[in-house]
Image (cartoon, rainbow, N blue to C red):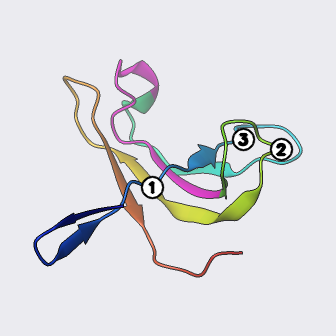
Amino acid sequence: MGCNGNEMTAKLHFYIQDFIGGRNETVYEVARASITSTSPTSFGLVQVLDDVMTAGPDMNSKPLGRFQGVLRRFRSENNSVHLGSRRGRAA
């Protein structure tokens, strides 16, 4: 942790564990545009997620909480993703 005048800063490191498909899936498609399947950027795709946030890169690392939000692909000419997340309590 560092201190700049009256401001304190900290570097946080955590890992988001996505599971796409399978028994423990955490990312779900909720909507798509008519052009999503032919778009190189998946334009119009909307997904929701409920991922585990861990202390390390391994999925068996200590769980810190949940990362929940909505992924939206909104650019047709380059790859751009918007993630809106809700605030919540750690698990």
Magenta span has 79?
Answer: no
Query: In the figure, 12 relative to 43: above or below?
Result: below
In primary-sequence order, the first of circles 2 and 3 is 3
Percent x, y for residue 45?
A: 43, 42
**In the picture, which quadrant includes the C terminus?**
bottom right
Q: Secondary structure at mark 1?
A: loop
Badge 1 amino acid: Leu
Residue under the point 76% across and 37% down: 21
Q: Secondary structure at mark 3?
A: loop
Q: Nearer the viewer, mark 3 or mark 1?
A: 1
Q: Which mark is residue 19?
A: 3
In front: 66, or 14?
14
Magenta region: which residues? 37-51
Residue at label 1? 12
How busy is the neighbourhood of tag 2: few (under 14 within 10 Å), some, or many (20 plus)?
Answer: few
Residue at label 2? 60
Q: Are marks 2 and 3 in contact (CB under 8 Å)?
A: no
Magenta span has 41?
Answer: yes
Looking at the rendered structure, the number of numbered marks drawn on it comes to 3
Q: Secondary structure at mark 2?
A: loop
Badge 3 amino acid: Phe
In primary-sequence order, the first of circles 3 and 1 is 1
